[in-house]
Amino acid sequence: MAADAGTVSATFSDIGVRTTLGGTFVDGGDNISADPILRGTLPRPRLGSPVIDTGTCAGAPATDIDGDARPTGPGCDMGADAVVP
């Protein structure tokens, strides 16, 4: 008997290509599927990334993973790292 795979929801995310092997995927809207243009070996976007200013500030923490204030531009960036120009 297979275990219940559950439900995954995504909103304001760069989900790219996804494969659902089980369970349910709920597209909450405002998702994109684009190359996030990451810098170096860090999973952090760089200038020109489509995740910049395309997230939502609603419910987002006041600072990013590096402690930088959000937003750093006209809107919040998708993901844990706000791009600081």
Image (cartoon, grey):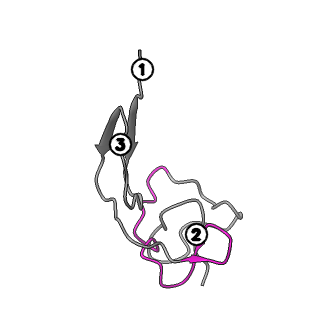
Secondary structure state at the residue bearing disc 3: loop
Quadrant housing the C terminus: bottom right
Quadrant housing the N terminus: top left
Label 3: few (<14), some or many (≥20) within 10 Å?
few
When the figure is inspected, residue 16 is found, relative to residue 74, above or below; the finding is: above
Residue behind mark 1: 2
Label 2: few (<14), some or many (≥20) within 10 Å?
many
Residue at 53% over, 69% down: 71
Specify whether 7 is left or right of 42.
left
Residue at 43% over, 73% down: 35
> Among all residues in the image, which is located at the extreme right?
66
When the figure is inspected, residue 60 is found, relative to residue 8, above or below; the finding is: below
- CA gap between label 3 and label 2 equals 29 Å
- The amino acid sitting under disc 1 is Ala
Q: Position of residue 24 (x, y in %)?
A: 32, 35
Q: Position of residue 59 (x, y in %)?
A: 48, 49
Q: Position of residue 76 (x, y in %)?
A: 48, 67
Q: Earlier in the sequence, mark 3 or mark 1?
A: 1
Res. 20 mark: 3
When the figure is inspected, residue 67 is found, relative to residue 6, above or below; the finding is: below
Residue at 31% over, 59% down: 30
Q: Is residue 80 magenta?
A: no
- The amino acid sitting under disc 2 is Ala
Q: Which residues are magenta?
A: 38-59
Residue at 39% over, 61% down: 16
Residue behind mark 2: 82
Secondary structure state at the residue bearing disc 1: loop
Q: Is residue 58 magenta?
A: yes
Kindly report which numbered mark, 3 or 1, lies closer to the viewer in this rendering: 1
